[in-house]
Amino acid sequence: PVPVTLPHRYRPPGGDGIHAARFSLRFDRTGAEDGVTAVFLPRFSDAVSLSVNGQRLLPAPWLTGHWRNFHHWHRPAIATVPNATLMPTGNRLDIDLAAHGFQDIALYPVYVGAAAPLDFVYELWGILRVGTARVNFSLVLLAGGAVLLFWLMHREDMLYFWLAAASFASAAVCYHWVYPNLLTDYRAWLTLWNTAAALQIWCTLCFVCALLRVPLRRLRLVCLALLLTGSAALALLPLDAFQAFVALYQLGFILMALVMLTVLVAWRQATHPLNFAVLFGLYALALSLALAQWASRHFWADWAPSITSLMIPVAFILSLLWVIFFQLARSIAQYENLTAALQTTIDEKTAELQASYERLADR
């Protein structure tokens, strides 16, 4: 055994296999003998199994072949044990962690104590992480469906098509934080997930071009070609180069988001100043969060808070809601202006007819 200080991270050398590590500590029983003790892990990576005095409290999915359960790095974990089964002192807690070769093994501070308060904190962490992720997933999926239906009724406006496409790509990204891996091959799943993130940014670029009425077809085609080439490389590169290329690929679609912001700034006069300000602010926020998360993942471990990645979809959802609200407000304003103009024309023609009747009556 080697002493470690929490938080502790270990990055496997790579490959497509399963890497495991065991962390052990001693603790004393607290509370009455008829009480319950809880072991609470706010954060860890990637799959966990807990044992107290040799009694397994949480199963080990990697021992049963449940590879899709390797998806716990954003979830808290808790296990309880009756105090009657614990010794007064010197109880042994074993924390077994396992991860795919493309994921870090990491353990953060562990809490052992009375079950009731720790269970309350566990529920709060679950709401913050898993609950937020599920809300994000549901919102982008529902919004994407609603915008797609609107586009099907107004196909001449591609703006809504690109919004719907970006929303569905965002839903695929949000899925990563909600449910077990969609594909049992973890490398294939990471490739699909990163491709969905890149497609979301590309579709948002197309939306910005449609909003500003600047086609920029060559720029969009070049970005799409680079995106698909990178996805093919992720699927075909040797295993030992996969993790490094994932970092490069993610940096590439972050730069594509920067290109999208540049287009928005360069043609900002094509939209209302308020619309530009809100969209630029939200897209810039999402870009900053993505860059921080990328740096924290690949260079400076834990530099960005763990919930940073969950806030990126929130910025996109807010931008989506803003676009819907702004387009609705603009349509209402255009309708009111058209109605006012028609009413003015009617009043003028009525006055002209009245004058004509009066002239005829004088004759």
Image (cartoon, helix red, strand yellow):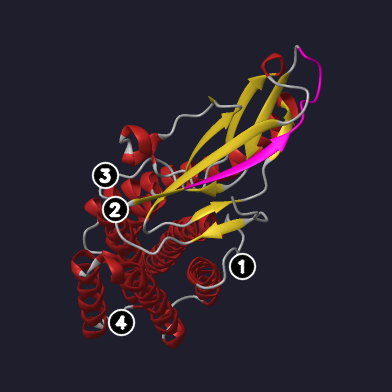
Nearest to N terminus: mark 2 or mark 4: 2
- Of the numbered discs 3 and 2, the one sitting upstream in the chain is 3
Alpha carbon distance from label 3 to label 2: 7 Å
> Which amino acid type is shown beneath numbered disc 1?
Trp
Q: Residue at x 73, y 34 (%)?
A: 27
Residue extending farthest top: 34
Query: Disc 2 versus disc 4: distance between alpha carbons?
Result: 35 Å
Residue type indicated by callout 2: Trp
Res 214 label: 4
**Does residue 316 show up?**
yes
Circle 1 residue: 303
Q: Position of residue 178 (x, y in %)?
A: 43, 43
Task: From the viewer's side, name the closer residue of 30 and 229.
Answer: 30
The quadrant where residue 311 appears: bottom right
Q: Earlier in the sequence, mark 4 or mark 1?
A: 4
Q: What residue is pinned by disc 2?
A: 189
| Magenta part of the chain | 21-33
Instruction: Answer with mark 4 or mark 3, whichever residue precedes in sequence.
Output: 3
Front label number (4 vs 3)? 3
Which SS class for mark 3?
loop
Badge 3: residue crowd in 10 Å (few <14, some 14–19, many ≥20): some
Please state if 81 lies on the left or on the right of 57 as rendered.
right
Residue 188 picture location, percent across and down: 25, 55
Number of the front mark, 4 or 1 = 1
Residue type highlighted by circle 4: Val
Q: Earlier in the sequence, mark 1 or mark 2?
A: 2
